[in-house]
Image (cartoon, grey):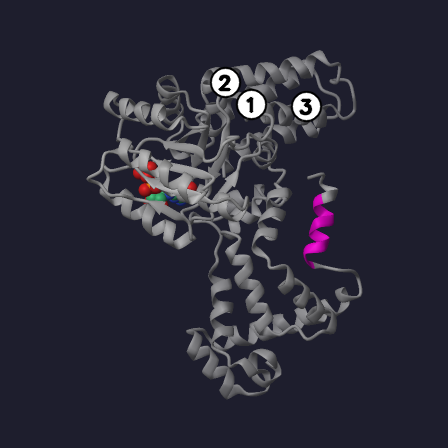
Amino acid sequence: MFESLSGRLQSAFSKLRGKGRLSESDVNDAMREIRRALLEADVNHVVAKKFVDAVKERAIGQDILQSLTAGQQVVSIVNDELTRLLGETQAKLERSAKPPTVVMMVGLQGAGKTTATAKLGRFLATSEHRRPLLVAADIYRPAAIDQLVALGQQIGVAVWAPGAEVAPAEIVRTALDEARRGGYDYVLIDTAGRLHIDELLMNELDQLRQLSEPEEILLVVDAMTGQDAVTVAQSFHEALGITGVVLTKLDGDTRGGAALSVRHVTGCPIKFVGTGERPDALEPFYPDRMASRILGMGDVLTLIEKAQAHFDEDQAKVLEQKMRNNDFTLEDFLTQLQQVKKMGPLDQLMGMIPGLGGALKNLPQGGMDEKPLKRIEAIILSMSPEERAKPELVEKSSSRRVRIAKGSGTQVKDVNQLLRQFGEMRKMMKQFSAMGKGGKRSMANLKNRFGA
Ligand code: GDP
């Protein structure tokens, strides 16, 4: 995410940090560099200028230049201002006092609106324990209806889809009836998109707005489109009065311009970000955490939340016990591996670890190489349950090693390597097991420590 911008900012900071006391011209140089980095990241030029002016004013006005930690303090001001630019505090989804809460999802075709509707449904159902009803009101792109129905099935969330022959207003009217009758507390309407903004589209959306009186009109925009995303947001806001933005495709090669400009230009907060194609690739947007990620300082809180959402507490306890007793098997290792994979692509996870964000820009195109993990998984899957429980059986028998290598499409040396690494790991676990508790409890402690 925003690797190039991150890299440029960090290089500007390293010059400041290395200096101790700073002169006004040091600050001016750094701000010039930051401004250039922002413009290159496709940040709106007015936003970029206001941003560096604000940082400069605070840095020079506060008498910090002569302090020995001047560089550090300037970085901290940049962090504050970036957080402010991104919206200061998290903007939660509004809820109606009288359910159902209606959320209209709007946006141009291809922005990821249908996907985001399903993702939001999944988020409300799993993280907030709500009962959402998804409404297929995009009748112009026939595939949109099928797509929403399929996604609904996949995530176990109800979809109201009377079909492409029914007028959108009628679909919405009947959906609201259904929601009241069925006790749904959220109605998420996937509205029609177009390739470009046109009056017809806005009229239809306005009609649906008057009919459904939504608490939220969320505009879904593609972060990859940079400044265009901001122009689109402005038009939608003028026509409909949007209440928030869902920024999609942040997992792609986005430069950051849309994320950094959209709040300032429209005055509307980013409420969620999409970080992948899967229905679980949606994160609530936290300005402070995003600022921290952009500045290469990681995002430990999101990482912990992901781990908590994907790790099963009972299973964690069992594993912890196994590690203590030193009977952690290859089968357990496989389970762990598969759980980590569920948390998301490795390079996204690494970007959340403080200090590792910068290392990511050296990765080859297409992200981190997940092949070794797949290889390990294939090798373990080719073992019998007995072999997984007692790796020494494999260690002792070359015919077993050959069979497993063949079965997993790997080489005997890969099998040997895995056995060796696993042996080392067990040794380490034995040492660690005396040192304290793992699992979810210590995650909670960690979270407390980070003040969440
Ligand atoms: P709509 O026309 O706005 O309804 O767009 P869709 O929901 O059909 O999405 C268009 C394409 O973008 C699909 O191929 C989605 O899988 C993809 N997509 C949506 N959100 C994301 C995201 O956050 N990351 C990535 N990588 N792809 C996304």
Q: Which residue is mark 2?
A: 47
Measured Cα–Cα span from mark 3 to mark 2: 19 Å
Image location of residue 75, percent across then percent down: 66, 27
Three-letter code for the amino acid on which mark 1 is drawn: Leu
Q: Is residue 435 above or below residue 189?
A: below
- Compare marks 3 and 2 and give the one earlier in the sequence: 2
- Compare marks 1 and 3 and give the one earlier in the sequence: 3
Please give the name of the residue rendered at 55% of the width and 88% of the height, measured from the top-left corner.
397
Image location of residue 406, percent across then percent down: 42, 79
* Residue that extends furthest to the front in the rendered view of this protein: 181
Looking at the rendering, which quadrant does residue 164 occupy?
top left
Secondary element at tag 1: helix
Q: Nearer the viewer, residue 239 or 180?
A: 180
Main SS category, magenta section: helix
Task: From the viewer's perspective, tell me whether residue 347 is left or right of residue 444.
Answer: left
Give, as a single range, the part of the protein colored magenta: 439-447
Q: Nearer the viewer, residue 329 or 20?
A: 329
Secondary element at tag 2: helix
Image location of residue 52, percent across then percent down: 57, 18
Image location of residue 136, percent across then percent down: 31, 41
Q: Which residue is mark 1?
A: 85
Q: Nearer the viewer, residue 333 or 1?
A: 333
Measured Cα–Cα span from mark 1 to mark 3: 16 Å
Question: Could you classify mark 1 by the number of other residues whose Cα lies within 10 Å: few (under 14), some (14-19), or many (20 or more)?
Answer: many
* Residue that extends furthest to the left in the rendered view of this protein: 165
